[in-house]
Image (spheres, coloured by chain):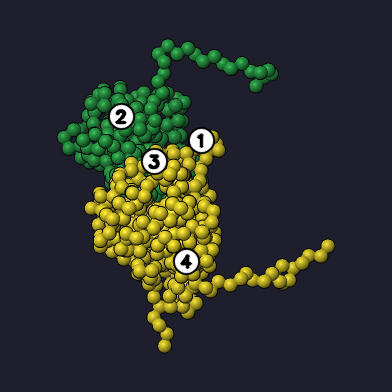
Amino acid sequence: MTAARSLVVDLGGIVLPTPVMIAAGCGGTGRELVGLVDLRRVGAIVSRTITVTERVGADMPRIAESPAGIVWETGLQNPGLDPFVSGELLRLARGGARIVVSIGGGSLEEYVHMTSVLQGRPEVAAIEIHLSGRDDELDRDVLGAHPDRLNEIVGAVARMSLVPVFAKLPGGCDDVVGLARTAVRAGATGVTLLASPPALGLDATRERLRIGTVSGWLSGPALKPITLRAVFDVAQALPDVPVIASGGVRTGEDAVECLLAGAWAVQVGTATLTDPAAAVTVAQGIVRRLNAAGLTSPAGLRGRLRPPEPTGAESHPVSTP
Amino acid sequence: MKRARAEILSTRRVGAYRSITLVAPEIAERSRPGQFLAIAMPEGRAFILRRHFSIHQASRHGGWAGTLEFVVDPSVGAGTGWLAGAGAHEFLDVIGPLGKAFSYPKRLTNCLLLAEGRGAASLFFLAQELVARHKRVDMILGGRTLESVFKPVDAKRLSQTVVVMTADGSLGERGGILDALPDAVARADAEVVYAVAPAPTLRSIAAFCREHRLPAQVAIEERMGCGFGLCNTCVVPVATKDRSAYENLRACVDGPVFDPSRILWDRWLGELPIVPPTAEPVPAIPHGGGEP
């Protein structure tokens, strides 16, 4: 007798109905997706990144298409922690999905304050730590790119938090494995790989920059191979740590690739902007693959990855002069 | 708001534009003037985001019941170019109706509608609804050339007067829609102004309306990411109700129709350059040698 097939995943204490989450900044404020997707069939929604005080956000324009991607910068526009907790968080949770709150800041104090306010809120299933912003205290461009600071921030949030904590590592950094190891040693339940890397959008014809803040971030399908590499490397080094793949997941096949590379779950972001039901269709794609492979859970895909086909004479005939 | 796989019933050329009619009853019956559609592009590396089009017609009754019409400018880019080439019986992934609609005046009756280029598409829908509410409608339509003035002949059926402005003078008067605004307001005894145009033009219209104490509504044509409120990239800085601060509102869900007197135009578009009153003509830079 075989066990029943199930998409449920346990990411070190947070149990999700499917391994497909909506990434930070793409899940709306609890109103937008109503009627466009059944949120009970979404693994979890990561909130937009919340800061202690309101941010009005970046100057326009904020988005530009690029080949297989978008370059964007919203400047972490959000209402601030207290209005978020009393409004948006409740609305998001009402849709029926598990809610992961993304927190961002420029100082240790801000991260600590947000973590303390979020504790005990029944709507908060987990915390994801946004680490790609500016470090105001140490005057550095990317807060989470430095192991000392990563250790300090993640350590403080993890010690205070009653719910699982995921560190979303900055994109475009060296030594992802080293940063992941630091985050986990500091107490993170798992890591989200990766945040959008820095990018620039240009219009050659008009000789103009395309983003109001000059620089932005790259999202979309262009990121998938980078995500796979980060997930693969971290999963090899830290096989017991829940890894969430984020960046370039658009289809069920993309998600299966991430799971094969070692991810425990995936996030869809940009794909949701085009197909609001993407998180559900990606999960359906995983189900099809599990059925075809005779597997009973997404975890069964981990460790199945084999080396490339040997390049034999048949596939690559040697040409003779 | 509904998502539909909608069949293209027909497409036809309208001047420089392509008008596309869809069968989408669930969206058509909910649509109001000023609202828009988000249409998915084909799979591929060239197109990541949906494209957004204001609703030109939504038929709820009669032989065309359940159909929706929107207008594409093929010159905008690859996405709209692809859409302009789509043919009857193809299917589009459509989400709509999106955004806040124009509101109709309760007491005031004389409405002046002005638009540049394809922006006029949604004003025809608005004009119909206003006429049905026994309002007087006058229109100013503009464009670069006669081809880019949207449906100047049809406009006459809906409005008392139509003024056409082209940049090259190939149809109507030479100039922009702004040039025609003061006269048109006086002639039509306009009490309310509705406008759809690029943001810099709307800014000037807003300044005129404020100066003449005319209530106005503008629909902005900001480039959008998703169109339904997720991505926070189509924002417009709008003063809070007490006007003590501003917030960046999403044009897709909080607009695209706004009260222009509450938009912080300088914040949004940058401050206008100050032209010195006695500016000398700039001398031409002499060539280093030879004919250009």
Question: Dot 4 corresponds to which residue?
Answer: A263
Question: Which chain does the numbered disc 3 sit on?
Answer: A
- Whether residue B89 is visible to the viewer of this picture, yes or no, is no
Q: Nearer the viewer, residue A9 or B223?
A: A9
- Other-residue count near label 2 (Cα within 10 Å), few / some / many at <14 / 14–19 / ≥20: many
Residue at mark 3 to residue at mark 1: CA–CA distance: 18 Å
Q: Nearer the viewer, residue A111 or A258?
A: A111
Question: Dot 1 corresponds to which residue?
Answer: A208
Question: Which chain does the numbered disc 4 sit on?
Answer: A
Question: Dot 2 corresponds to which residue?
Answer: B206
Q: Residue at x 23, y 53 (%)?
A: A86
Have a look at marks 4 and 3 and say if they share a chain.
yes
Q: Residue at x 40, y 39 (%)?
A: A60
Asked whether, in this view, residue A152 is left or right of residue A202, the answer is: left
Image quadrant holding the N terminus of chain A, namely: bottom left
**In the figure, what tint was chain B given?**
green
